[in-house]
Amino acid sequence: MPAAHFQLALCHYRRGAMAECVSESRRAIALNPFSAPAHFRLAIALFHLGKLEEAAQAFEATLGADHEYVIAWYHLGIIRERQDDYDGRRSRASSTSSRRTPTTRRRTITWASRYERQGLDALAMSALTRALQLDPSDEAAASALQELQR
């Protein structure tokens, strides 16, 4: 009964019992490993517990089950930004210049495109604004942002 465990996880989440939410989410996943919502619920609970690396793995599992699970991309992006790890590999450099890589900017623009396709214009604008912060001369990001603002 994966649905029962998923519903229990949701109840625990709503009352703020993240450890119990993690436990029930794992039970739901054990019964249905292809459930993107169960992986997502686990990831969110781990995120709230501050277990960012485990949460990132759970968000990646969510995306493995459903690549278009936009809110999982969003949260994974938050974690990677906190870790300065947009490419999924930990950056050893701690300077601001390490965040200004072309790959980081491309990744941010990719998120913006996914958000826009899902009709999440506010998130798309936020990602494009971030891309412009990384590279103010990026004409493609500036053009896409102007288009969204219309």
Image (cartoon, grey):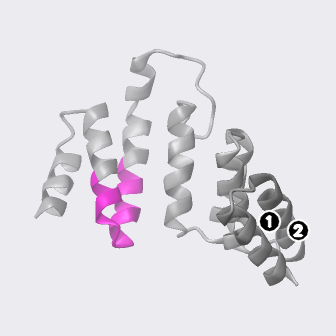
Asked if residue 61 is among those painted magenta in the image, a careful observer would answer no
Residue 38 found in image quarter: bottom right
In the rendered structure, are the residues bearing label 2 and label 1 in contact, judged by CB atoms less than 8 Å apart? yes
Helix, strand or loop under label 1: helix
Residue 8 screen position, x and y as percent: 79, 73
Q: What residue appears at the point 73 percent right and 75 percent down from the top-left corner?
A: 35
Magenta stretch, residue numbers: 109-125
Vertical placement of 28 versus 45: above or below?
below
Q: Main secondary structure of the magenta part?
A: helix
Residue in front for this viewpoint, 30 or 92: 30
* Residue 74 percent across, percent down from the top left: 49, 54
Identify which residue, 111 or 16, lies in the foreground: 16
- Label 2: few (<14), some (14–19) or many (≥20) C-alpha neighbours in 10 Å: some
Q: Is residue 92 visible?
A: yes
Circle 2 — which element?
Answer: helix
Q: Which image quadrant for residue 21?
A: bottom right
Q: Is residue 34 visible?
A: no
Residue 40 image label: none
* Residue for badge 1: 25
Q: Which residue is mark 2?
A: 27
| Quadrant placement of the N terminus | bottom right
Q: What residue do we see at 69% from left, 62% from top?
A: 15
